[in-house]
Image (cartoon, helix red, strand yellow):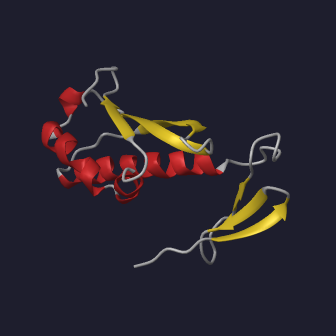
Amino acid sequence: MSETVHLQQQQDYRFEIRFGPGGVPLLADEPAPLGTGAGPSPVQLLAAAVGNCLSASLLFALRKFKQVPDPLSASVTADVGRNAEGRMRVLALQARLTLGVPAAQIEHLDRVLATFEAYCTVTQSVQAAIPVQLQVFDSTGVQLK
């Protein structure tokens, strides 16, 4: 299996990204001073990919047990700084997933929380180079992981 996206420069650092035939294009842009911030930056797209993959993996694992955690939400913070060579890099990612219901309403939650992260294709791939810290909360704010 392979996935291909196509990027076309629009102006300066602004690119239109196409995700396949019939897909809705996305505009990406670097923030000022390089770009104009007309769309998400590459760092934001990376953070979104990690958050989306973790959320989908958690949802899939819970639905296997016929559980309804909806609506899930996620936030991912990317720490950007200079590496040892002085080049800008994503140094770490912190992901926070929140279930849409209290933990008490979810059966098999401990089992799901122990395994779902391992099935997240994007996070497991990114984590080989960038540390990813994950926290999971229920809708009442109780930290579960």
* Residue lying furthest right: 11
Q: Position of residue 26 (x, y in %)?
A: 68, 59
Q: Who is closer to the viewer here, 112 or 91?
A: 91
Quarter residue 70 falls in: top left
Residue at image x 17%, y 38%?
109
Q: Is residue 24 left or right of residue 97?
A: right
Front-most of 105 and 16? Answer: 16
Q: Position of residue 62 (x, y in %)?
A: 24, 47
Can see residue 71?
no
- Compared across the picture, whether 100 is left or right of 27 comes to left
Which one is in front, 108 or 135? 135
Q: Nearer the viewer, residue 103 or 38?
A: 38
**On the picture, is 80 further left or further right than 15?**
left
Hey, which quadrant is residue 11 in on the image? bottom right
Quarter of the picture holding the N terminus: bottom left
Q: Is residue 122 above or below residue 23?
A: above
Residue at horizontal 74 percent and vertical 51 percent from the top? 29
Above or below, comparing residue 22 to residue 134 in the picture: below
